[in-house]
Image (cartoon, coloured by chain):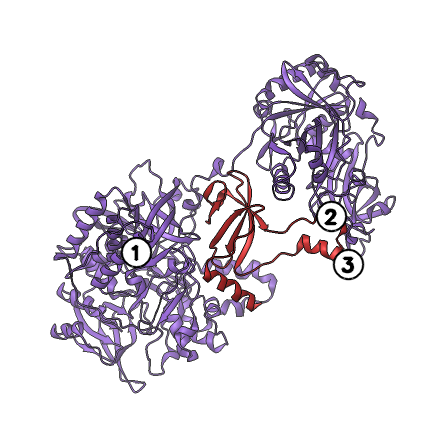
Amino acid sequence: MLLIKCPFCGPRPELEFSYGGQAHIARPKDPASLDDESWAEYLYIRSNPKGLHAERWRHIHGCARFFNVQRNTASDAIVATYKIGEEPPKPVDPGLEEWSSRSGAAL
Amino acid sequence: MRYRLPAGGRIDRSKPLSFHFDGKKYSGFAGDTLASALIANGAHLVGRSFKYHRPRGIMSAGADEPNALVGVGSEEARYTPNLRATQIELYNGLVAESQNRWPSLSLDFSGANDLFSRFLPAGFYYKTFMWPASAWKKLYEPMIRRAAGLGRAPEAADADRYTQVYGHCDVLVVGAGPAGLAAALAAARSGVKVFVCDEQDQMGGSLLSEREATIDGQGAADWLAQTIRELKSRTNVVLLRRTTAFGWYPHNFLGLCERVTDHLGLAITKQPRERMWQVRAREVVLATGAIERPLVFPDNDRPGIMMAEAARTYLNRYGVLPGSRAVVFTACDSAYRAALELKSAGVEIAAIADVRSAPNGRWMERARAAGIDVRPSTVIAGTYGRLRISHADLARISGGTMGHPETFACDLLLMSAGFTPSVHLFSQSRGKLVYDEDLKAYLPGTSVERERSVGACRGVFDLGASLADGFAGGLSAAKALGGTAAAEHKFSVFAQSLGRDGFIGAPPSGGKSRRTRAWVDFQNDVTAKDIELATREGFRSIEHVKRYTTTGMATDQGKTSNMNALGIVSQTLALPASQVGLTTFRPPYTPTTFGAFAGQSRGELFDPVRKTSIHEWARENGAVFEDVSLWKRAHYFPRPGEDMHAAVRRECKATRESVGIFDATTLGKIEVVGKDAAEFMNRMYTNAWTKLEPGRLRYGVMLREDGFVMDDGVVGRMSPDRFHVTTTTGGAARVLALMEDYLQTEWSDLDVWLTSTTEQWAVIAVQGPNARKVLEPLVHGIDISQQAMPHMSVQEGHICGVPTRLFRVSFTGELGFEVNVPMGYGRGVWEAIYAAGREFGITPYGTETMHVLRAEKGYIIVGQETDGTVTPDDVGLAWAIGKAKKDFVGKRSLARPAMSRSDRKQLVGLLTVDPNIVLEEGAQVVADPSEPVPMTMIGHVTSSYWSVALDRSIALALVQGGRARIGSRLSVPIPSGPVTVEVVQPIFYDPEGKRLDG
């Protein structure tokens, strides 16, 4: 069970949270102006990296707030958690950067 | 107990115990395991093997035991199959039985499988039971299930109680052998909070069987006792005996299963049988030890053939002689120690066959000095004896050929190929393993989690080195926590080194391996030949070899077999072992009961139950309930002698003709409040809300962003900045989550607050032409006349002195009200309405009648008429879309071409030509029933009922291009033949809606 640091409440076990999918996918300001392909991209296309992944979690059984998490999908290491609207921090763990660049190279 | 020594061991001879095995009475002592007590009685034959039903004996003395699986328990509700006899603590009155044999252990009919073994090679099931497919279910599977398999599952519900507890510690030490205890000492002396767990009933690991080694000037047993005393005396230490760390989950979260009462036997206890610890440890020290490897030689599976260290454990820990004359087959030094100790206890050592060409060192010299016949470059070429080993053939290998075998009589054969470090938990933590050529073993390499391995589980075998390694590991864990570590400690240890030799794979056999069977995986009956065959048939990946041969796939997960299988693949493919790779370790380390995982979540506690405040009234009045998500809802209210159909007909009729009362409390409710509440509603729902006046209701439709219907419900505008939103019963949490998602992450600038009020309001639906007459005398401050309170309006006031939000709304098509009152008043107001309705024959109705009445009106139910691929237009709700709105969730998706195709499935009504046929919900709709199967399916029935009002059956269906087919005939094939249906408008009763006003 992951130990997730809610930016509002502190570290809590995973079962207090619900998963919210990939982070930093903003709803287009004017959906009507998008062509079908761009809208489909927004709706359906998500990344599936082996390595660093920015994702949303919600502290559903706590403060009920959404927030963002950077997690290494290969090791489950959580690198950072931050509030909605905040800039994602740059990865600080050099091993992790190596991970992401390696998986990038493999693609 | 012929084989029990008069003194020695850690058993209590003052506490004799009696037990039954296969109906025969035996005796043992407190401190015995079932295995040690059986061996003390000379009983080695304890089971039959999985596939060939070969007689099998006790091979090990611990968790790695592959053969001695037994069923334990005298009563069915406490019977447990497949327990390892080596881990069952003996208690007075224990009843155990062998498994996988019929009619008896010594005479087993399926043993014939063994004679036909050459027709049962690796992959036999895949090759033989392929065709015909129809035979699988009726013939092959039942046959295989009967023939193979382990113990039988008990048929009574488990009578025991299980519990779960969370644990938090700074350092968790897994394993309390010398390395683990040293680590625990170091961490405990550093002042951090320490948990120590060990799967055995006593802590000490290998020290429990140690004879001659001394630590800090004391005998091993004395040092052990003193160490445990010190750990116990510290308040920062928790010692967990009989506790198996079975699984590693992310972020240093470990599952521990503590067996609390099994060893107490039949004693009455209030304790749970097992306690599941879910431990979050800041640092972990793995001191999980190592498992001795068998040697792979012909017929190496007879009862009386056991691991050399196991024999030593039976002798030193349990005071039991595992035999009287032993042959030893080894590839390492430790078996010499076992031979010497057994000899000094009176076991004759016939010979030691050593695979190594030039064994040397202190242990070998001591064996020779003791007069033991030591034979280098020698293997065992075969064994004899049906239910117990009687002879062994020893043959010298030179220049790749096998010499003439020499036969030795024996009743015990000890084997040792060296030790396999237990890296299970390390590997589960996703740590990277590294192959050690020298040790022929995988060792922990790079860590992923906050842990370190110490002692034998990372290849540090010698006692002194292991203690030092453990202590250093404990200090490093304490330091990693940022505190001050305790002082270093140098252990002064006297113990003869055991070297690091080992062997994996099959020892040389002089080219005779094809004809003989040498077991690799004892529990799944896999031989060296099977693995060679798999490689010949082209399987190269160890993961594929594993699945094809089933090696390592038994309940012991290959604890004794995986490295030998890997060695054989390496030998036959001429690949270095490090390149063959290792199969994945998965939890649990040893089989763990479902009870421990379930904990208290059984029976009524399996899931939470939600009940309305009117539930008890319904129960008292004979309601039959159904589960709707977690809610219990009254399904119907049968009168004596009525079945569901009769009750529903009566409830429908009463509601249409006079008045019915229905508990709608389970509807989801969300209070949407704030300056921007209307704007928020505009964005979340398809409808337009800006112009909805306070005091009015509107039916709202919510889409997902992909344009499909997600939920619906009636929404009341209580004031300009306040909406009372209702949702479907099952969708309440989903709708609130979606609203919160948009509010928090997309539109955080909106001034809106969302509050779930589902459990705050009891909702009583009063429906039927007399509904107003029933309510009129009960309300205060509300004019519920037609003029003052038209359909789809809401008023606040009082009913029976209780504050209410009174909705004028109908889900039946009749004049109707929904009375919202604070939850605690639900039953009181319900009873008052019921009493007032008596003169009109007010009839309580359940969800089934509710469904029929709404279907007669063509009102959809989200999740029944919709399935996540249905647009508002598909179900005839295009009118609910605010066309003038620039945007709402799902709007852009509705503009995608696929969403407006004319052949989309659309909601229609179906009337069977024979009015008495009620279609099955879910039945497929076809245009041409004469087509061969599979026919072209153009839709399906979503709702189907008998309508009392129409005195015939009715159905709703989603049909391709359905609206254009209205007036035509289609067909619904059912097992008895096609049913012809007429496609009609999806509204059957009062299409003009005149009845809404009574």
Q: Residue at x 36, y 44 (%)?
A: B168
Q: Which mark is residue B98?
A: none
The letter of the purple chain is B
Q: Which three-letter amino acid code belongs to the residue tagged 3?
A: Pro
Q: Position of residue B399 (x, y in %)?
A: 30, 87
Tell me, yes or no, whether dots 1 and 3 are on the same chain: yes
**Element type at mark 3:** loop
**Element type at mark 2:** loop
**Element type at mark 1:** helix
B675, B301: nearer the viewer: B675
The residue that label 1 is drawn on is B476
The residue that label 3 is drawn on is B932
The letter of the red chain is A
Q: Quadrant of the C terminus of chain A?
A: bottom right
Q: Which mark is residue A30?
A: 2
Q: Is residue B59 visible?
A: no
B234, B381: nearer the viewer: B234
Q: Chain ID for label 3?
A: B
Relative to B65, say whether B438 is above or below: below
